[in-house]
Amino acid sequence: MITHANRSKFDLPGAALAAGFGALAFALLSAGNSDQGAQIPSTIEAQEFVVQDTSGTPRATLGIGKDGTAALKLLSSQKKTAVVTMGVTKDGQPFFEMRSPTSKCKIVLSVKDDVPRFQMLDRQGKRRLGFRVDAKDGAMLTIANKKEHDVLTCNVSDRGHWSLEVRDAFGETVKKLGDR
């Protein structure tokens, strides 16, 4: 039973998204089908679906972008910008992004060319931290400055080799350690 004290736990974008898509599906399937024996369509096709909250504010979209990317976007209620995006690029590369509704700060998880990647971007949208795992090269961790120059790189290969490289503000190697 949902009481007044714990009701706010259920006011989540996910619940709104599920309810919105359920209502949309119900409305589309029942529109024009007043007969009991009416045929229910097995497919609903569109370029974009928009889910709104009770005040009419868009809170989620599912659609195809101008660049051909298919994505589900959960929107901020204040700025109406995507704060969570899950999608697949036109060339089949999956990605997941979480971002601040007020800046370009975001976290990106993606797979590109069979290499899983994790990146963190600062408030200006600059890559500051990266991690990837590659079957050919092993694992790599990079920390970058605000100009996106890698200043610390750590590599570990599948054969047990490792390297640690420190660079200056322009990306020039200052110190390199390891057995590579």
Image (tube, rainbow, N blue to C red):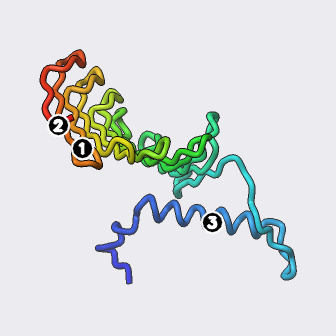
Q: State the quadrant of the N terminus.
A: bottom left
Residue behind mark 3: 23
Amino acid type shown at disc 3: Ala
| Mark-to-mark CA distance, 3 and 1 | 50 Å
Residue in the foreground of this view, choosing between 171 and 83: 171
- On the picture, is 172 further left or further right than 90? left
Of 87 and 72, the residue lying toward us: 87
Q: Answer whether labels 3 and 2 touch (C-beta < 8 Å).
A: no
Task: Read off the residue under disc 1.
Answer: 156
Q: Element under label 3?
A: helix
Q: Earlier in the sequence, mark 3 or mark 2?
A: 3
Question: Disc 2 designates what residue?
Answer: 179
**Viewer-side label of 3, 2:** 2
**Which secondary structure lies at badge 1?**
strand
Q: Choose between 103 and 109: the one closer to the eye.
A: 109
- 167 above or below 25? above
Determine contact: label 3, label 1, CB under 8 Å. no
User: Badge 3: few (under 14), some or many (20 or more) residues near its Cα, within 10 Å?
Assistant: few
Indicate the position of residue 26 as horizontal and vertical percent values: 68, 69
Residue 167: give its label: none
Residue 91 rendering spot, x and y as whole percentages: 60, 41
- The residue shown at (57%, 49%) is 61
Query: Who's the residue at 47% across and 65% down the image?
Result: 15
Q: Label 2 sits on what residue type? A: Asp
